[in-house]
Amino acid sequence: MAKPISIQVWNPSGKYRVVSTKSMPGDRWIRLLTDQDCRVEICTEEKTILSVDDILTLIGDRCDGLTEDWGEVLFSALKRAGGTSFSNMAVGYNNVDVSAANKYGVAVGNTPGVLTETTAELAAALSLTAARRIVEADQFMRAGLYDGWLPHLFVGNLLKGQTVGVIGAGRIGSAYARMMIEGFKMNLIYYDLYQATRLEKFVTGMLSSPFTSYGQFLQVNGEQPVTWKRAATMEDVLREADVISLHPVLDKTTYHLINKERLGIMKKEAVLVNASRGPVIDEAALVEHLKANPMFRVGLDVFEDEPLMKPGLSEQKNAVVVPHIASASKWTREGMATLAALNVLGTIKGYPVLGDPNSMDKFLDKSSPVPAACPSIVNAKELGLQISNL
Ligand SMILES: NC(=O)c1ccc[n+]([C@@H]2O[C@H](COP(=O)([O-])OP(=O)(O)OC[C@H]3O[C@@H](n4cnc5c(N)ncnc54)[C@H](O)[C@@H]3O)[C@@H](O)[C@H]2O)c1
Ligand SMILES: O=C(O)[C@H](O)CO
């Protein structure tokens, strides 16, 4: 007999039962659901990750929508309980077996757009922190080791005029690239399967006057214009860039994208940042590379065996590690909760799915009524859901 799971209930008499496996920030998402006749159950267990059995208990024998780590067993249980809707509170959905969801007719929601800038800012922070050895210097200071200014104390890398490499120049990768170009006047080299047209236009391009591009703006102000290049291969980025940030989705094409061989072609003093997904880097190979190359530095928000780090990583002074906080700003996390709730609500109500998963503003604007649509359902086409342009 499964152990009972502790929950908090909102609007107990609501017609639709929606379960959230975690407490999510803010209360707008709860109101949006309860106003539309949903009974909302929020798991209040203290453990961070629920087991499959815990979630099966939460689903029970009737559940209309739910939010966690999902595959065949859970989607079939949700279907048996009458559920048609699931949402990740995340843009990445590598934790979801979408073909199992398709098999059981369950819509899979995600939360794009609202976390783009917040995640890019953390990647920029990790780049700077690693390049300028801020964590090492902070620890040194707190340990009472500072005896006075020295020419060689914590010498790091200057970013200005160096080259930033972006692998995966989608929403977050492009936002990060712009921050590094504007903030530190770095040159850009990027690799993506597709051309990042908007990003390219930003650096050189054809945007409106008074300046046609950021490069021209710098020139007019007496500064060296920045350059950009779309690399033909990922190896070109690894060879040329001084700071490399990873922003692709995680799938079989990006698993261990950074491995021993590819680490080997990077500059000895390069900075590598990962705020995408842990398994994009072969973390055991990275630990060896960090040991052998003390001037090579990494900033990691995500880990291959999350929440664990590979043996040896935590001892490396040339690694900055943070616990998957890239999207952790108040505005973003409340927005993610709202989008996740609206994905579930919209599916329950049979609303169409927004055709453009990059324009979430209308769902996030607290001063106007929320549109009768699902913000982002990744398997809308497979399930034959109606698409709307609002
Ligand atoms: N650390 C965090 O908290 C956090 C927060 C948000 C997103 N993420 C991760 O970041 C990822 C990207 O998010 P996004 O909103 O920018 O997604 P996006 O879809 O806009 O961008 C992903 C880009 O990766 C590119 N890509 C796919 N396969 C590739 C390959 N083999 N080589 C190079 N590029 C490839 C795609 O063409 C696309 O441009 C998410 O899938 C998620 O895993 C992490
Ligand atoms: O994919 C995502 O959105 C993150 O990992 C959580 O912010």
Image: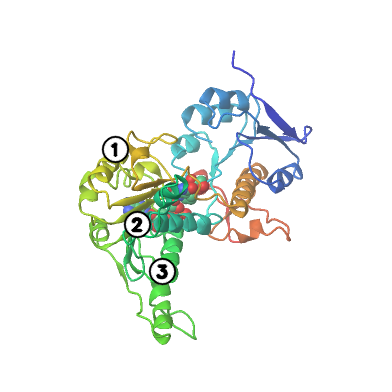
The amino acid on which the numbered mark 3 sits, given as a three-letter code, is: Phe
Q: Residues within 10 Å of mark 2 (few under 14, many from 20)?
A: few
Residue 143, placed above or below residue 115 = above
Query: At 69% from the left edge and 55% from the top edge, which residue is drawn?
Result: 370
Residue 184's tag is: 3
Q: Tell me the element at label 1.
A: helix
* Viewport quadrant of the C terminus: bottom right
Q: Looking at the picture, tell me which residue is in the foreground, 375 or 143.
A: 143
Q: In the image, is 313 to the left or to the right of 373?
A: left
The mark that comes first in sequence, 3 or 2, is 2
First-in-chain label (2 vs 1): 2
Q: Quadrant of residue 174?
A: bottom left
Q: CA distance from mark 3 to mark 1?
A: 31 Å
Closer to us: 227 or 295: 295
Sequence-wise first label, 3 or 1: 3
| Label annotation for residue 284 | 1
In the image, farthest residue toward the top: 1
The N terminus appears in which quarter of the rendering?
top right
Image position of 367 with respect to 342: above or below: below
Q: Residues within 10 Å of mark 1 (few under 14, many from 20)?
A: some
Residue 146, x across and y down, in percent: 41, 52
Disc nearest the viewer among 2 and 1 = 2
Q: Position of residue 215 (x, y in %)?
A: 39, 79
What amino acid is at disc 1?
Ala
Dot 3 lies on which element?
helix
Label 1 C-beta lies within 8 Å of the nearest ligand 1 atom: no
Q: Which residue is mark 2?
A: 153
